[in-house]
């Protein structure tokens, strides 16, 4: 079958060649997936490399040469950082149980809260919250509705201005002098 016949039949010869992985390529793909899964869970390249039985230098080389792998790497790191952030958020909200010892014996636990971490998380998300609220406001009101409201306000202002000018013109006409309290 010629390449034109293959293409007309819906087959892509280049993709077919790429899909026939050698055992080494298949192993590399499986190790990449192990690395990426561990990276998403831990956000630690060194630990994830050990788990996948790959050297960090090999991983960095693959990342530099393979844009798809580089994108998956970034996505895994982002996922890992989201998990870490959520864990910190839970600790900031609920506190951490810390054991209390007296005389070398465990006598109980206390809740310990890390306000500094909570404040840093709030600072990080202040802009995100503001953008979310702005988006929600924009979504609840369409551009057409906003323009209509602005046009109505402008029309009301024009009408008030025209009425005021008309009163001023009437007051300045001869014979329309203000009446004084003294006739005579």
Image (cartoon, helix red, strand yellow):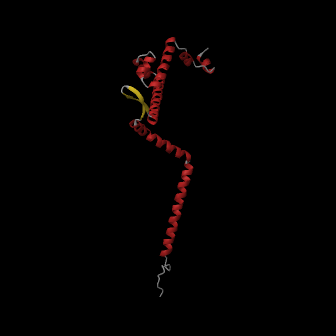
Give x and y (percent) for residue 180. 47, 82
In the rendered view, would you say 77 is above or below 173? above
**Residue lying at 62% horizontally and 18% vertically, measured from the top left:** 5
**How many numbered marks appear?**
0
Give x and y (percent) for residue 114. 40, 35
Residue at the bottom extreme? 184
Residue in front for this viewpoint, 81 or 164: 81
In the rendered view, would you say 46 is above or below 146? above
In the rendered view, would you say 98 is above or below 57? below
Residue at the right extreme? 9
Residue in front for this viewpoint, 46 or 62: 46
Residue at the left extreme? 103
Which of the 4 quarters of the picture holds residue 45? top left
Which of the 4 quarters of the picture holds residue 61? top left
Residue at the top extreme? 23
**Residue lying at 44% horizontally and 20% vertically, measured from the top left:** 48
Residue in front for this viewpoint, 127 or 183: 127
**Horizontal side of residue 134 vs 115, given as left or right:** right
Give x and y (percent) for residue 139. 55, 44
**Horizontal side of residue 125 vs 148, given as left or right:** left
**Horizontal side of residue 55 vs 158, given as left or right:** left
**Residue lying at 55% horizontally and 48% vertically, measured from the top left:** 143
**Horizontal side of residue 110 vs 160, given as left or right:** left
Quadrant (top left/top right/bottom left/bottom right) for the N terminus: top right
Give x and y (percent) for residue 165. 49, 68
């Amino acid at each position: 079958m010629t390449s034109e016949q293959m293409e007309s039949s819906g087959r892509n010869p280049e993709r077919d060649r790429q899909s026939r992985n050698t055992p080494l390529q298949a192993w590399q793909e499986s190790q990449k997936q192990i690395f990426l899964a561990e990276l998403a869970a831990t956000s630690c390249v060194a630990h994830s490399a050990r788990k996948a039985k790959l050297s960090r230098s090999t991983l960095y080389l693959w990342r530099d040469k393979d844009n798809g792998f580089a994108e998956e790497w970034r996505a895994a790191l982002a996922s890992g950082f989201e998990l870490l952030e959520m864990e910190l958020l839970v600790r900031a909200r609920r506190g951490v149980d810390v054991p209390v010892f007296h005389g070398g014996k465990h006598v109980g636990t206390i809740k310990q809260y890390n306000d500094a971490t909570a404040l840093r998380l709030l600072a990080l998300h202040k802009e995100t919250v503001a953008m979310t609220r702005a988006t929600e406001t924009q979504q609840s009101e369409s551009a057409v509705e906003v323009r209509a409201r602005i046009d109505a306000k402008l029309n009301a202002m024009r009408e008030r201005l025209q009425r005021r000018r008309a009163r001023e013109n009437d007051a300045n006409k001869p014979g329309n002098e203000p009446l004084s309290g003294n006739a005579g």
